[in-house]
Amino acid sequence: MLIGLVRESVMQCFCHTCSRAPHLPVALHRTQIPITKVKTKPRGIQTIANQPKRVQFVTTEVRCQEKTRGGLRYEVILGEAEPKVQPPKKQQLSPKNSMSVQDIEEKLKAAEERRQLLESNKMAALSAKMSKIEEANRKRDEYNNQFITTTKEALDQKMGQHVEKREAIITDLKSKMKDHIENVEKTRLTLEQQTDEVRTAIEDKLKTASQQRDDNIKKMLERLKEHEEQVQKVREQNTQRLQQLDAAIQEKLGQARTRKEQIEQEQREKLRNHLNKSMEVKQFVEETVKARISGVAAFIEDKLATALLKREEQIRRKSDIAKKYVNMPPPFP
């Protein structure tokens, strides 16, 4: 029986095509395992009967040997039997002694003393922390006061330097502004002199320009008179030319009208001839189309007839082949 169990376990591990593999239990995921509450027993004296039974194991050895390609042979060798050793029996525990009232009172007193000692230690630690905090606050105040005094002295010194620099800058600006005002006054005087000179020059130029303008106006009037006379001459010449052109145009229009009538008559005759020819061509085309349609219809009918004959021939051949296959005996009785 043991050898059979070992053989089955080995075959289960290495051979996936075994016939007993489908009967093996399916592995479950840890989330699919049902949760069961463990029944705990009250603590107490355990008897030898309640102790779990020891399982007797037999020492075995499995040897694997490859006999053929793709095949394995397993050998199970049993070891020597070990001597049975009985487990030592546990001694029965004696029940605990009951405590007296005096012992309980002593324990309560000791607990009260420990609590008081803990409270005193906590208060001492808190007082030490408070003293450290006060010392830190005092040092911080001293540092802040020292910082305020030093910064105030530095600011006073900087303000003094700034005031001195400001006064020096103001005096420098005043001297520069005085020089600038003097330069502006000088430039103003020179500009006034220049404006007076420019004004006199402009007045002289305006006088000469007005004289030249009057002379130019007189010359322009004389030229305009000459131009009017020339325009009148040109207008008369143009009227004469227009009259000549009008007569020539009327003559050409009469010639064009007669020419147009002749061309229209010729076009009518050409259209009449063209219509006659088109009617003849239309009749000829209709006759040819009818002849072609009749020829095509006859050709299509011939094609359809030949196609029907071919189809019937193919159907007959297929039916003959099917009859042969139906009448043939089966290959394997």
Image (cartoon, rainbow, N blue to C red):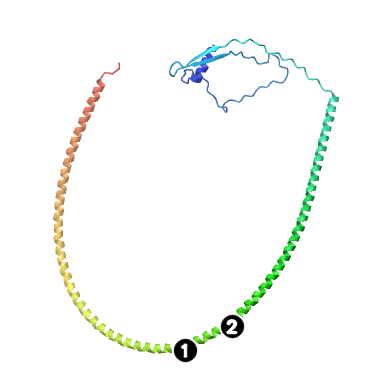
Q: What residue sits 28% from the left and 84% below the top?
A: 234
| Residue 323 place in picture, x, y as percent | 24, 23
Q: Quadrant of residue 259?
A: bottom left
Q: Is residue 164 above or below residue 201?
A: above
Q: Quadrant of residue 119?
A: top right
Side (left or right) of 119 relative to 256: right
Disc 2 element = helix
Residue located 82% across and 40% down the image: 124
Please identify the quadrant where the N terminus is shown. top right
Can you give x and y, in whole percent of width and height, for residue 278 in the image? 15, 56
Residue under label 1, please give it. Answer: 207
Q: Residue 140, position in %: x, y?
A: 77, 51
Front-most of 146 and 235? 146
In the picture of the structure, the residue carrying the numbered disc 2 is 189
Look at the numbered disc 1 and give the secondary structure of its residue. Answer: helix
Relative horizontal placement of residue 191, taking residue 287 as reference (left or right): right
